[in-house]
């Protein structure tokens, strides 16, 4: 059984999950001070965090934020690696959609262009409206490789990754 529990004061558990989140996403081993800073920022006004509970264990979190209106941006979704590929991320998104639809007409999600797995999941879950486009200018191109090209408005953009990036499992 998967449930979302709004974060109230489970600081120790959430800090542990935030540390693993950054380690899995970019190999960053955060200090306690950095993790506490994230926790403070992610729980201040305009943000909500829900702990993902699977069979009575805290296995991840969903961080929602506001970008000027309602708290309707899914900023971060994380499921511990040992619990991935069980549908936990999918079910967690569905549960948070039910929360957000009570006060907003949309839920927004961003994904790194190289995170094809996440993009395919979001598409499968009905996320079909292209809302914003982030573009980047790379200054140090020697350590980057193009993994694919996409065309938007007759313009070609490259999706790049670092040469040494291992395939990181971001979701579900």
Image (cartoon, grey):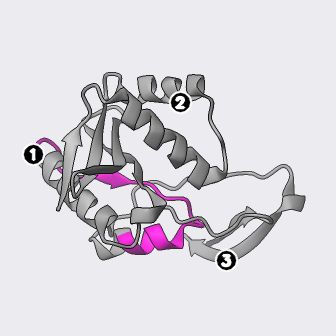
CA gap between label 3 and label 1 equals 38 Å
Dot label at residue 148: 3
For marks 3 and 1 on the same chain, the one whose residue lies earlier in the sequence:
1
104 magenta-colored: yes
Bounds of the magenta segment: 102-121
Dot label at residue 90: none
Is residue 112 left or right of 65 when viewed as pictured? right
Of 15 and 22, nearer the camera is 15
In the image, farthest residue toward the front: 56
The dominant secondary structure in magenta is: loop
> Residue 128: x and y, percent?
33, 70
Note whether residue 171 is visible: no
Callout 3: helix, strand or loop?
Answer: strand
Dot label at residue 35: 2
**Residue drawn at the location 60% of the way across and 75% of the way down:** 150
- Looking at the image, is 135 positioned above or below residue 48? below
Crowding near the residue tagged with mark 3, few <14, some 14–19, many ≥20 C-alpha atoms within 10 Å: few
- Looking at the image, is 21 positioned above or below residue 13? below
Place residue 67 in its image quadrant. Answer: top left
**Residue drawn at the location 80% of the way across and 66% of the way down:** 163
For marks 1 and 2 on the same chain, the one whose residue lies earlier in the sequence:
2
**Residue drawn at the location 55% of the way across and 59% of the way down:** 112
Place residue 31 in its image quadrant. Answer: top right
**Residue drawn at the location 55% of the way across and 70% of the way down:** 152
CA gap between label 3 and label 2 equals 34 Å
Crowding near the residue tagged with mark 1, few <14, some 14–19, many ≥20 C-alpha atoms within 10 Å: few
Crowding near the residue tagged with mark 2, few <14, some 14–19, many ≥20 C-alpha atoms within 10 Å: some
> Residue 102: x and y, percent?
9, 45
Residue topped by disc 1: 102
């Amino acid at each position: 059984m998967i449930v979302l529990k709004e974060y109230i004061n489970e600081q120790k558990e959430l800090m542990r999950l935030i540390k693993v989140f950054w380690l899995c996403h970019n190999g960053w081993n955060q200090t306690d001070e950095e993790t506490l800073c994230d926790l403070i920022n992610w729980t201040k006004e305009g943000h909500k965090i829900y702990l993902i509970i699977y069979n009575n264990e805290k296995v991840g979190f969903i961080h929602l934020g506001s970008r000027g209106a309602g708290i309707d941006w899914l900023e971060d979704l994380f499921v511990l690696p040992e619990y991935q590929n069980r549908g936990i991320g999918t079910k967690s998104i569905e549960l948070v959609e039910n929360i957000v639809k009570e006060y907003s007409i949309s839920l927004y999600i961003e994904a790194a262009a190289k995170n094809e797995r996440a993009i395919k999941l979001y598409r499968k879950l009905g996320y079909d409206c292209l809302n914003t486009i982030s573009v980047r200018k790379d200054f140090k191109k020697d350590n980057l490789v193009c993994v694919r090209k996409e065309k938007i408005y007759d313009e070609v953009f490259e999706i790049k990754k670092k040469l040494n990036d291992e395939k990181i499992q971001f979701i579900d």
